[in-house]
Image (cartoon, grey):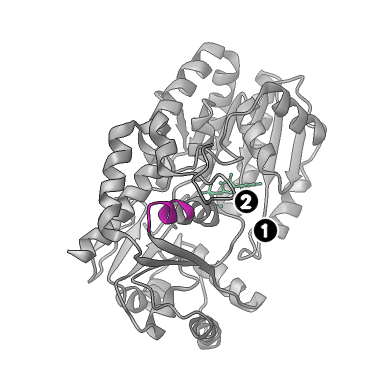
């Protein structure tokens, strides 16, 4: 990676993407960034680690700085009570039931207020991510537009919760959702930006065979049989039980090892319980790992014969794009953002049931040619549509629209 003069470490610059997206795109992005030089931008979410939002903000905030905007990233803090409530909200926004008592609403609003006091959000553009910090807009002294960036699947929110949150949302100047299916009836503009991946990160960069082998051996992952892999936070929406059931059916037809690699996010209190449930299935051919090892994610997504992301709800599903980038065929749940990444039969498969998933696993394991073909198309899909430059450009367009 090229160092910029004055940079002690070689941070990724937008120019580095030229080899993937071409000089014209890089030039266009730099042109769009020109009117925004020194603009002060804040992104606010609820965790610095774990889950797709932190995964995105980490490279995005650096790339925004690299094109001249003074971009900060803040994560709100709160006690476990707060995160228990916000996790229930997250689940209910994706359709689960919720019993939001006045006491819980008070805890939620008070903790967000405390964070408003601690964080002076007087930036030219403020982007608030997801429901956890949503009400912070009430306490802002707006110096510029505020945007609510919601990453969850909003197609069918629990009605009482949505009625409670909607007035907060409408205090923003715009909302950004991942796909048009998540649009709600709102008095503010709604835009649609799908997330994207950083091809230069440890998780996504090229890896030599020897490095892949070393990571797998380090974690005692057997490689004598083809690997079926799902990489996901331990969360019911990711349907780890369904993946296990599909793998059990598939292995009757063709031998394979299942690896479930998961982690937990600091704003997700349900992870430990789901992890313990999944651990009960472990045997020598069903490996369950909870490790904070980004290179292992890369190695598994590369070495897998098939990556599965059998989610029941999925705002976008970065893990899908990550595996596709590596040329690995992906079988995804036919839901939410996964549907916008996988074109069934062209660059992967979409499935609606355990049996369907099992049949696709068997089909792929039996055909190296099909795996190669889908993997090639998958890589090309990500190159064209899901690299971070596209996401950055959408933000630049949005920020410029407010400038006009
Ligand atoms: N991830 C990881 N280690 C794990 C599990 C997940 O690094 O053990 C990463 C994964 O590679 C992806 C992100 O966490 O970058 C999850 O994002 P996604 O959009 O797939 O799901 P979310 O967790 O936001 O629902």
Quarter of the C terminus within the rendering: bottom left
* Other-residue count near label 1 (Cα within 10 Å), few / some / many at <14 / 14–19 / ≥20: some
Q: Are marks 2 and 1 in contact (CB under 8 Å)?
A: yes
Assess mark 2: CB under 8 A from ligand 1? yes
Q: CA distance from mark 2 to mark 1?
A: 7 Å
Question: Which residue lies under the disc numbered 1?
Answer: 271
Residue 261, picture quadrant: top right
Give the image quarter of residue 18. Answer: top left
Q: Residue at x 52, y 77 (%)?
A: 99
Indicate the secondary structure of the residue bearing disc 1: helix
Residue 327 is one of the magenta-drawn residues: no
Image coordinates of residue 97 in percent, x first then y, are 50, 68
**Whether residue 280 is visible:** yes
Relative side of 134 to 209, left or right: left
Could you tell me which residue is drawn at 75 percent across and 35 percent down?
A: 286
Which span of residues is magenta-colored? 62-68
Q: Nearer the viewer, residue 154 or 217?
A: 217
């Amino acid at each position: 990676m090229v160092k910029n003069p004055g940079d002690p470490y070689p941070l990724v610059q937008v120019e580095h993407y030229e080899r993937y997206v071409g000089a014209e795109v890089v030039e266009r992005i730099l042109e769009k960034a020109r009117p925004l030089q020194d603009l002060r931008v804040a992104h606010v979410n609820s965790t610095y680690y774990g889950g797709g939002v932190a995964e995105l903000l980490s490279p995005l905030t650096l790339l925004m700085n690299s094109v001249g905007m003074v971009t900060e990233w803040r994560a709100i803090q709160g006690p476990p009570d707060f995160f228990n409530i916000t996790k229930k909200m997250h689940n209910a926004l994706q359709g689960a039931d919720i019993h939001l008592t006045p006491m819980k609403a008070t805890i939620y609003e008070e903790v967000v207020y405390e964070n408003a006091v601690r964080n002076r959000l007087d930036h030219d553009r403020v982007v608030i991510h997801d429901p956890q910090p949503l009400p912070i807009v009430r306490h802002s002294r707006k110096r510029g537009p505020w945007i609510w960036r919601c990453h969850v699947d909003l197609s069918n929110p629990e009605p009482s919760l949505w009625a409670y949150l909607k007035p907060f949302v409408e205090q923003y100047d715009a909302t950004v959702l991942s796909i048009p299916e998540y649009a709600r009836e709102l008095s503010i503009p709604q835009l649609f930006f799908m997330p994207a991946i950083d091809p230069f990160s440890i998780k996504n960069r090229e890896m030599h065979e020897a490095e892949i082998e070393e990571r797998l051996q380090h974690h005692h992952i057997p490689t004598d049989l083809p690997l079926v892999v799902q990489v996901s936070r331990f969360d019911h929406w990711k349907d780890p039980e369904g993946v296990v059931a599909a793998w059990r059916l598939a292995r009757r037809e063709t031998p394979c090892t299942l690896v479930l690699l998961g982690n937990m996010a600091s704003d997700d209190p349900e992870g430990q319980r789901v992890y313990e449930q999944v651990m009960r299935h472990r045997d020598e051919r069903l490996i369950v790992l909870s490790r904070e090892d980004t290179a292992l994610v890369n190695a598994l997504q590369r070495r897998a014969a098939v990556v599965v992301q059998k989610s029941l709800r999925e705002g976008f599903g970065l893990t899908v794009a990550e595996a596709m980038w590596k040329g690995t065929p992906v079988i995804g749940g036919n839901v939410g953002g996964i549907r916008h990444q996988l074109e069934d039969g062209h660059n992967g498969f979409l499935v609606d049931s355990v049996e369907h998933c099992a049949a696709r696993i068997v089909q792929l394991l039996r055909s190296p040619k099909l795996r190669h073909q889908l993997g090639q198309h998958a890589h090309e899909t990500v190159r064209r549509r899901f690299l971070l430059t596209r996401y950055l450009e959408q933000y630049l367009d949005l920020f410029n629209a407010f400038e006009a």
